[in-house]
Amino acid sequence: MPNKPAIASGFPVGRYDTAMLRSVRPPDWRNPVPSGTYNLVVIGAGPAGLVAARGAATFGARVALIERHLIGGDCLNVGCVPSKALIRSSRLYADMRNAAHFGVTPPARVDVDFNLAMERMRRLRERIGESDSAQRMAAEGVDVFFGQARFTGPDRIEVAGAELRFAKALIATGARPKLPDIPGLVEAGYLSNETVFDLTERPQSLLVIGGGPVGCEMAQVFCRFGSRVFVAQDDPMFLPGEERDAAQILSDSLARDGVEIHLNSKVVAVRVKEGRKEADLLREGSISTVTVDEILTGIGRAPAVDGLDLAAAGVEATAEGIKVDDFMRTTSRRIYAAGDVCLKHKFTHTAEATARIALQNALFFGRKRLSRQVIPWCTFTDPEIAHVGLYPFDARQEGIPVRTFTILMHDVDRAVTDGKDAGFVKLHVRQNDDRILGATVVARHAGELINGISLAIGSGMGLSALAKVIHSYPTQAVAIRMAAEAYERTRLTPLVHRLASLWLAFLRR
């Protein structure tokens, strides 16, 4: 008899949450009865799993998709979608407060309606979730199963009491928030990206542990919503992997918003006192204490492999994730992996890209390689910080001489008229060559600007060709062309300049 899974959700109960669950975890869903062998069984219905399942079904493959919690994974439910909805609302509040800067009389009061912002987030999440609903996936030819997947052999999986046989399988179970080892944190209670979007009341004060992308984005959001926000980062700068001047611009922006920043500070203890949370911060041998209503952890993510019994299928994994080769194949020849469960860089677009690689290699004898992909990323603070390709320090470690061409956003007309001229565009090229090795963009819309540079790198377009591309004016993307033109001017050597002068003098005769 078909299996009916129990519903599992951390969502608050509301009209949009109820509608959302009908898409991502229908309460009356009955798992299909498996028969025969599937061409592909996909474990995990996040971005990678959905792309792989849908893509395989499009080609007529027999596909099963297993999800133990909510379709859409972290991205839809507790990640990209809800966070970007709140970022947009918080930016509007910030612009309202700064209306005079834009030649507009600011409102007498800017009252934050936190519940309204959260309701908008949930409404948008429900709307976006409809496109990947269980019903729609089933209509596209995918057998959708809810329950915990467990390998019982190299070619079979058990879920909710049923056994599924497969020719190939894809593990796309994503990642879970890492919990910092801080005495008293669990007992006091804390928020992560999996629970912060369940809030129904704005915390008056918030401590964010970690200065990575999630920590910085949420610190700025809640500060702009009116919370008193502290950030404790045990490194000397935010976003340790980014270029230092980019991280400094973000640090300055957070400080202007009112975020209280504690760098080189480690949270060493948490306790509850009179209904509030006290956190001890250790910096250079001294202890200071902050008292807040909520604590949000954002120190990174760990691969979600618990309960899969990978050993039964011959799949090896470490604390960093499932081991895969350049073709996304695991240590088992039948089984592939994609997305956060096996990648260092845990982004939705990377998950989708690796799912496409795995799908082609698993089912269609492809030889697509992860190492040949050009992968950009962006931290969606204000300003945004986006990057693609090599950093200069990476190039130096590889013995590659680098030249950098930098355009400051305060020299870009559109950035000036937008009142968002903090930041820059940096293009890194190989010495004596115009090949783009990497780029960093710090700007209000850096995430949009980096895509054009990614296309140039992926297509082999050098700066000389990029300088010839006509960019619409006035846009912030003109900064990319300006950087390419700066490279072109370096080609005007004294000899070229002399020859040009002689030619022009000849024309005047």
Image: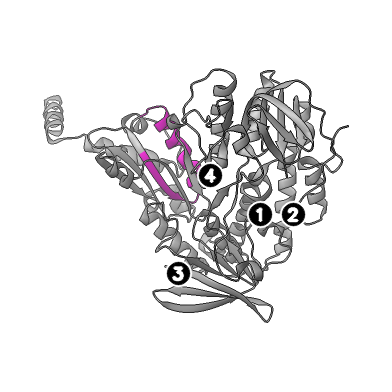
Amino acid at dot 2: Gly
Q: In this view, does 258 lie above or below 124?
A: below
Residue depicted at x 58% and y 73%: 270
Q: Of marks 4 and 3, which one's residue comes earlier in the chain?
A: 3
Q: Do the residues labelled 2 and 1 touch (CB within 8 Å)?
A: yes
Measured Cα–Cα span from mark 1 to mark 4? 15 Å
Q: What stretch is highlighted in magenta?
A: 438-461
Please tell me which of labels 3 and 2 falls first in the chain.
2
Separation of marks 4 and 3 at Cα, in angstroms: 25 Å
Alpha-carbon span between mark 2 and mark 1: 8 Å
Residue 209 falls left or right of residue 275: left
What amino acid does circle 1 point to? Answer: Glu
Q: Measured along the vertical axis of the image, is residue 295 above or below residue 163? A: below
- The residue indicated by pointer 2 is 10
Whether pointer 1 and pointer 4 mark residues with C-beta atoms closer than 8 Å, the reply is no
Q: Is there CB contact under 8 Å for labels 3 and 1?
A: no
Which of the numbered marks, if any, corresponds to residue 389? none
Residue sitting at x 59%, y 29%: 335
Q: Name the residue under label 3.
A: 265
Q: What residue sits right under mark 4 in the picture?
A: 346
